[in-house]
Amino acid sequence: TDYWVVVPAAGVGKRMGADRPKQYLPLLGRPLLSLTLQNILSWPGLAGIVVALSAEDAFFSHLKEANHPKVHRVVGGDERADSVLAALEFLSARESGNTPVLVHDAARPCVALGDITALLDREVSATALLARPAGDTVKQGCDTGGATFVERTLDRTQIWLAQTPQRAPLELLRNCISQALNQGAAITDEASALEFFGHSPQLIEGQSDNIKVTHPSDIVVAEAILRLRYA
Ligand code: C5P
């Protein structure tokens, strides 16, 4: 079945301290978002991509992929969830409610096709996400008198770190995000919006090279991964 991909790319990227939002920082001489879109456009069964952009975005129209017939754009919102919701509303006006949607961070250009195939497998739940089992021992902290101490050690075998893409049927995801936002829930990924209403998305183990470019050093790592991939 065909599926749509939503790419939230409306962040202003303050953490990077650069002169432009991080989705436009150069990797291997190309804007990060351009590499992410090129990767997505290579996935079999793709119906189209909806990219959520800031209203002030001055970079997107210069990307090679900007005028690709499968690439659509919407204006995003204040938070990542608002941006995703804007893209889902665009899709709702055009597609049936059970259309599978994959939400994928602009900042994850390295996700491998094998991970996408695993997430879209017919045996996998309609709500699912790529995630990594925790590799480090996980401590829950507690702040006391200006310092932080261990409250407890969590059972690492049950801890997963969420990646993207995260998949769900269009109308289910739109309803959950919209109602969770209305109720003031903290929504940091799509799965958390589904969980807020009692759904239990399936965890699909992804590869460790699906990194999110967050800090300047991540750019060097992502370039090395992409060089290996496209060599
Ligand atoms: O800042 P962080 O890395 O968590 O952002 C994840 C993704 O969400 C980025 O691709 C960013 O551009 C996007 N985003 C958005 N709208 C916002 C804030 C972030 O689309 N208001």
Image: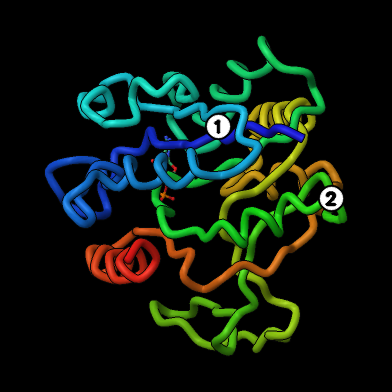
Ligand 1 in which quarter: top left
Q: Residue at x 77, y 25 (%)?
A: 171
Q: Dot 1: within a 10 Å radius of its alpha carbon, few (fewer than 14), some, or many (20 or more) residues?
A: many
138 left or right, relative to 63: right
Q: Which residue is mark 2?
A: 122
Q: Residue at x 43, y 79 (%)?
A: 145
Q: Residue at x 82, y 41 (%)?
A: 197
Q: Residue at x 35, y 61 (%)?
A: 230
Q: Quadrant of residue 119?
A: bottom right
Q: Is mark 1 within 8 Å of ligand 1?
A: yes
157 left or right, relative to 217: right
Q: Which residue is mark 1?
A: 84
Q: Secondary structure at mark 1?
A: helix
Q: Position of residue 160 (x, y in %)?
A: 66, 71
Q: Position of residue 78 (x, y in %)?
A: 43, 30
Q: Quadrant of residue 152?
A: bottom right
Q: Is residue 37 above or below residue 147?
A: above
